């Protein structure tokens, strides 16, 4: 968690506790406002505090600035400590359940003594909620489902969060002169969507020095084990990190073993056995003689396989492909020539169009599509036809200005309405370069209805892309029910491109969906859907996911040069 996110969390907790205590109606709102303000702050809160300009932040008055200062300086806030004693409720945990907010928390706390996820679950399963004022049978079912969603997401960490924690510790350890090689293996190296724990491997001249530094890393909550060849810590975020020391001449074998997956490793071991060899984390052996182990390539080669990119090591066909020399040439960051889905402060983005363009240009893109929300998404200040027409003129001017070398593409992320229509007139849509259609409403539609809706939208001749096709938010919201096979067929018929939304919490489509889509001959666009400058960097998570879906540059539309891109999205 970044410092800003930590502070936002503290403000939110205070707000929630105050609201549940119920003594003051207005104070909680001030804390929520401050929370939102800090969460969307473009600058590091610590720098603002150092300059002593916290009260310049919208929504941060004297009181809140004192709270923030106290937290940044001491890690504690007196008000929060007192509130937690007066109202012993795990408000953040309960508030994270979809469909549960402060009002419900207050009600179940007062009437049923619910204080956390476990006690709420018990009350809901016992049918105790549906008797409470304003809570029906339906809400009770929703809450039970919501608890399951939270539970499923709690134990694992999003890849992006795991990687940023890993990089922070790795960078510190790399500064030690005794470290020769250091790498994060396990599911993180395989770029799984979520991570159980981090698995560091190190080759060092003085392992104890590395171990000591490791257990003393910043952000450690508990030291689980501290030994000469293996140590484990738990970070404040709850994420566990293991560090293993490997001998130099076995580093490749250890890296291979601890990268996994278990299924992939089991297959390799049986191939070794059939060849009269033995494979373990120290090497590949013929009787007592080591035939490979220093590097990974050597092990795969000795087993008659191409080296397998970690993203493919799930035993879903990669072993056979590697035996036949048929592994795909997976896409890399260098192949990406532009981003086709992004927002500005005209809708719910945080930065101006110029700021976004400067940042995109710095990434070396050839083209960049600005695609703000449209009118039916009122909470995102979506654009109507008039505003869109103005936007079109504005982009013509920006292109003509010559300030940006890349081509600025005119786009919109239009809402797919309940009946499958789009929320902007065709007359205006036809003037845009790239139109993405997305579902943002009625996500609980029945499978048949949702499939019809999306397929009908794709029949519109002005739609080029289907945005975040399954609508899931990892650990928060499941995919909506939809017949993807029919969606893919319809997309192929009408030349609609499937988005791979690169936001770490979306990664939508998933790897299996991607493989199915390209098998049917569909093209994919990897888009960040950036709502602020920093989110343009999420492209890397889209690339990771694309690789897990076996995608090559040819499968991806935004690897094309501009001319070819415009030609191939034409209807
Ligand atoms: P995670 O942490 O749940 O996201 O997933 P992994 O894949 O990182 O799993 P983890 O941390 O339990 O173990 C790291 C790797 O070590 C795993 O991918 C393969 C290897 N490994 C662990 N246990 C076994 C085992 O019992 N057999 C074999 N062949 N390999 C194992
Ligand atoms: Ca792991
Ligand atoms: Ca592990
Ligand atoms: Zn979007």
Image (cartoon, helix red, strand yellow):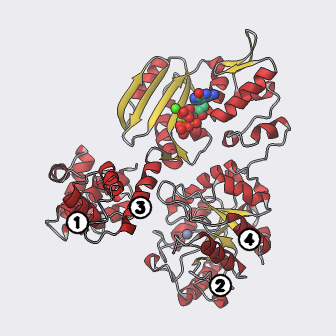
Where does residue 345 sit, x and y in percent of width and height? 47, 74
**Cβ–Cβ under 8 Å for marks 1 and 2:** no
- Identify residue for label 4: 491
User: What numbered label is drawn on residue 42?
Assistant: 3
Q: Residue at x 53, y 73 (%)?
A: 440
Where does residue 101 sit, x and y in percent of width and height? 32, 64
Q: Residue at x 57, y 83 (%)?
A: 391
The label nearer to you, 3 versus 4, is: 4
**Cβ–Cβ under 8 Å for marks 3 and 1:** no
User: What numbered label is drawn on residue 429?
Assistant: 2
Where does residue 461 sit, x and y in percent of width and height? 73, 82
User: What numbered label is drawn on residue 140?
Assistant: none
The secondary structure type at the circle numbered 1 is: helix
Which is more toward the observer, 550 or 358?
Answer: 550
The secondary structure type at the circle numbered 4 is: helix
Residue 93 left/right relative to 560: left
- Label located before the other in sequence (3 or 4): 3
- Identify residue for label 1: 28
């Amino acid at each position: 968690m970044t410092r800003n996110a930590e502070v936002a969390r503290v403000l939110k907790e205070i707000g929630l506790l105050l609201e549940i205590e119920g003594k003051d109606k207005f104070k909680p709102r001030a804390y929520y406002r401050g929370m939102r303000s800090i969460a969307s702050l473009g600058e590091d809160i610590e720098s603002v505090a150092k300059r002593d300009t916290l009260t310049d932040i919208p929504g941060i008055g004297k009181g809140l600035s004192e709270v923030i200062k106290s937290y940044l300086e001491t890690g504690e806030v007196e008000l929060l400590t007192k509130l937690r004693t007066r109202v012993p409720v795990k408000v953040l945990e309960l508030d994270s359940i979809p469909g549960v907010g402060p009002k419900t928390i207050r009600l179940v706390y007062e009437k049923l003594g619910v204080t956390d996820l476990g006690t709420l679950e018990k009350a809901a399963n016992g049918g105790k909620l549906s008797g409470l004022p304003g809570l029906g049978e339906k809400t009770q079912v929703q809450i039970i489902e919501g608890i399951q969603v939270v539970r499923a997401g709690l134990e694992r960490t999003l890849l992006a969060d795991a990687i940023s924690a890993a990089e922070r510790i790795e960078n510190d350890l790399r500064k030690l002169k005794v470290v020769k090689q250091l790498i994060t293996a396990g599911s993180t190296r395989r770029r799984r969507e979520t991570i159980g724990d981090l698995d560091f491997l190190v080759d060092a001249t003085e392992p104890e020095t590395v171990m000591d530094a490791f257990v003393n890393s910043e952000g450690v909550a508990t030291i689980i084990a501290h030994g000469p060849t293996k140590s484990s810590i738990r970070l404040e975020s709850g994420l566990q990190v293991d560090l293993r020391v490997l001998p130099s001449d076995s580093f490749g074998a250890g890296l291979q073993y601890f990268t996994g997956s278990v299924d992939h490793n089991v297959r390799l071991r049986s191939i070794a056995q059939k060849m009269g060899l033995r494979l373990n984390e120290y090497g590949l052996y013929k009787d007592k003689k080591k035939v490979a182990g220093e590097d990974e390539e050597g092990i795969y080669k000795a087993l008659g396989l191409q080296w397998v990119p970690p993203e493919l090591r799930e035993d879903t066909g990669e072993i056979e492909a590697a035996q036949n020399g048929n592994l795909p040439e997976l896409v890399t960051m260098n192949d990406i020539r532009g981003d086709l889905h992004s927002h500005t402060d005209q809708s719910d983005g945080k930065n101006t169009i110029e700021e976004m363009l400067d940042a995109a240009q710095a990434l070396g893109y050839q083209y960049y599509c600005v695609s703000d929300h449209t009118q039916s998404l009122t909470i995102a200040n979506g654009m109507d036809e008039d505003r869109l027409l103005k936007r079109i003129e504005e982009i013509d001017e920006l292109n003509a200005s010559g300030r940006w070398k890349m081509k600025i593409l005119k786009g919109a992320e239009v809402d797919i309405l309940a009946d499958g229509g789009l929320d902007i007139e065709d007359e205006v849509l036809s003037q845009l370069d790239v139109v993405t259609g997305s579902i943002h409403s009625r996500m609980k539609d029945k499978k048949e209805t949702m499939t019809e809706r999306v397929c009908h939208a794709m029949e519109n001749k002005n739609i080029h892309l289907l945005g975040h096709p399954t609508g899931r938010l990892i650990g928060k919201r499941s995919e909506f029910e939809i017949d993807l096979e029919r969606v893919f067929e319809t997309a192929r018929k009408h030349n609609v491109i499937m988005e791979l939304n690169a936001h770490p919490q979306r990664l939508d489509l998933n790897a299996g969906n991607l493989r199915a889509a390209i098998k049917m001959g569909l093209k994919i666009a990897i888009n960040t859907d950036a709502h602020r400058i920093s989110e343009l960097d999420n492209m890397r998570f889209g690339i990771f996911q694309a690789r897990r879906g076996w995608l090559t540059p040819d499968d991806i539309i935004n690897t094309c040069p501009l001319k070819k891109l415009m030609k191939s999205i034409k209807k």
